[in-house]
C-alpha cells in the first residue's frame, strides 16, 4: 500500500510501552458486508451491524474498493448535498477529485486526506479524474462520517486538504511498525486534521510478527478496521483479518499484533484506527443528512429542494 512511509523506520520517534496501565479488551468483531455507492463503485460497510452508541461520534465508514478498474470503469458520485456532519476521505491507492459549491476542492492520492465539514449545508462531487477513467487502475480508500454536536451542526462549511507528507509518523518500541497520525493526539503526536468533534485517526502498518502497544485517550471510544492482513488484537489476542471491525472496551491502550506469516499479496497487517469523545445526543440520519430530530431532517430536505444549500457552480462540466 503506497500510503506515506519512510525508507528507515528506525529514525522515527518511538511509542513507549504503557503496559503498566489498563489494556482495552475486545467487545466485538464484525465483518463488513459488500455494497455499492454513488455511480456503482464497490464498498464495504465497515459499521454494519454495530450499535450506533458504540460508534459515537462516528456515523458511517465505507471502505471504497480495493478494486482494479479496467479502462472506462472508474466511477465516482454525482453532485449531492450534506448537512450536519463531516466527511473524511482517505485515499490509499488511486486518485480522487473533490469539488464543492463553497470553493473547496482538490485531488488526493496515495495517503492524502480530504476533510469536508458540511455544517449548515454543502453540495459536492467526488470523481476520478478523466485520464484515470480512460486508463483504469487500482482504487482503494475510505470515507468516514463524523457527527457534529447540535451546537455545531449549522457551522460554516470548511474544506481541508491534508497531504500524505503532513501526517505525523511514529514507530513502536521494536521499530517494525509505522503509525501515521491523521488527526487528534495519540501517544504524544498530533495529526494535521482540524476537528470540530474531539477524535483521533491513524493508519497503522505492522510487519509480520510485529506488536504495538498504543496509548489511547481513556475518554474516547476505540475502533479498529482491518484493511489487509491477519493478526490479533487485545490482551487476549483475538484473531482478526481483512474487512473486520473491532470495537474495544474501556482502558488506556490498545494492543495489536501482526501474524508471523501473511498471504502472498500482503506484506503487513494494515489497520485503520479511530476513536472519539462520544457526543451522546439524539441522532436522526437519513440519506445525506445527519441531524438531531426528524423535524430537522425534514427542514434539511426542504432547504436543499429550495436551493438554500447553494447551487452547482455554473462553470462545472
Image: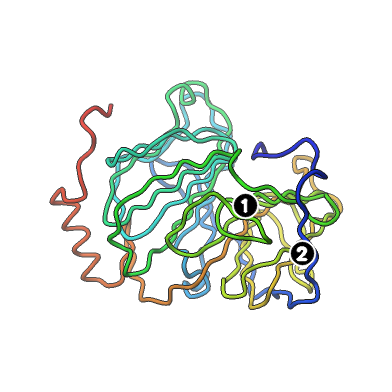
Q: Which image quadrant is residue 167 in?
A: top right
Q: Residue at x 76, y 46 (%)?
A: 12
Q: Position of residue 105 (x, y in %)?
A: 38, 37
Crowd around label 2: few <14 · some 14–19 · many ≥20 (10 Å)? many
The quadrant the C terminus occupies is: top left
Q: Nearer the viewer, residue 152 or 91?
A: 152
In this picture, is 80 found above or below 14?
A: above
Q: Residue at x 35, y 76 (%)?
A: 282
Q: Nearer the viewer, residue 108 or 19?
A: 19
The quadrant the N terminus occupies is: top right
In-image side of 181 versus 314 (left or right) = right
Q: Which image quadrant is residue 15 in?
A: bottom right
Q: Position of residue 73 (x, y in %)?
A: 47, 30
| Disc 1: which residue | 181
In-image side of 63 versus 177 (left or right) = left
| Disc 2: which residue | 213
Amino acid at each position: 500500500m503506497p500510503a506515506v512511509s519512510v525508507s528507515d523506520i528506525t529514525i522515527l520517534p518511538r511509542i513507549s510501552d504503557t503496559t503498566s496501565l489498563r489494556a482495552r479488551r475486545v467487545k466485538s468483531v464484525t465483518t463488513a458486508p459488500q455494497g455499492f455507492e454513488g455511480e456503482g463503485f464497490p464498498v464495504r460497510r465497515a459499521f454494519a451491524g454495530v450499535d450506533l452508541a458504540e460508534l459515537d461520534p462516528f456515523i458511517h465508514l465505507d471502505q471504497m474498493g480495493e478494486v482494479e478498474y479496467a479502462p472506462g470503469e472508474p466511477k465516482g458520485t454525482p453532485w449531492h448535498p450534506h448537512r450536519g456532519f463531516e466527511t473524511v476521505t482517505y485515499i490509499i491507492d488511486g486518485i480522487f477529485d473533490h469539488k464543492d459549491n463553497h470553493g473547496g476542492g482538490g485531488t488526493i492520492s496515495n495517503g492524502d486526506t480530504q476533510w469536508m465539514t458540511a455544517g449548515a449545508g454543502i453540495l459536492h462531487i467526488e470523481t476520478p479524474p478523466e485520464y484515470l477513467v480512460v486508463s483504469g487502475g487500482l482504487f482503494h480508500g475510505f470515507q468516514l462520517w463524523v457527527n457534529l454536536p447540535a451546537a455545531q451542526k449549522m457551522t460554516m462549511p470548511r474544506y481541508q486538504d491534508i497531504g500524505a507528507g503532513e501526517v505525523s509518523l511514529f514507530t513502536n518500541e521494536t521499530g517494525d511498525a509505522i503509525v501515521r497520525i491523521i488527526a487528534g493526539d495519540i501517544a504524544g503526536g498530533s495529526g494535521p486534521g482540524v476537528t470540530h468533534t474531539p477524535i483521533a485517526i491513524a493508519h497503522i502498518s505492522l510487519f509480520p510478527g510485529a506488536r504495538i502497544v498504543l496509548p489511547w485517550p481513556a475518554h474516547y471510544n476505540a475502533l479498529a478496521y482491518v484493511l489487509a492482513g491477519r493478526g490479533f488484537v487485545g490482551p487476549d489476542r483475538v484473531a482478526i483479518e481483512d474487512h473486520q471491525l473491532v470495537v474495544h472496551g474501556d482502558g488506556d491502550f490498545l494492543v495489536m499484533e501482526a501474524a508471523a506469516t501473511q498471504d502472498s499479496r500482503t506484506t503487513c497487517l494494515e489497520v485503520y484506527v479511530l476513536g472519539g469523545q462520544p457526543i451522546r445526543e439524539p441522532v436522526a440520519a437519513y440519506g445525506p443528512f445527519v441531524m438531531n430530530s426528524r423535524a430537522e431532517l425534514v427542514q434539511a430536505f426542504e432547504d436543499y429542494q429550495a436551493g438554500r444549500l447553494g447551487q452547482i457552480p455554473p462553470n462545472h462540466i
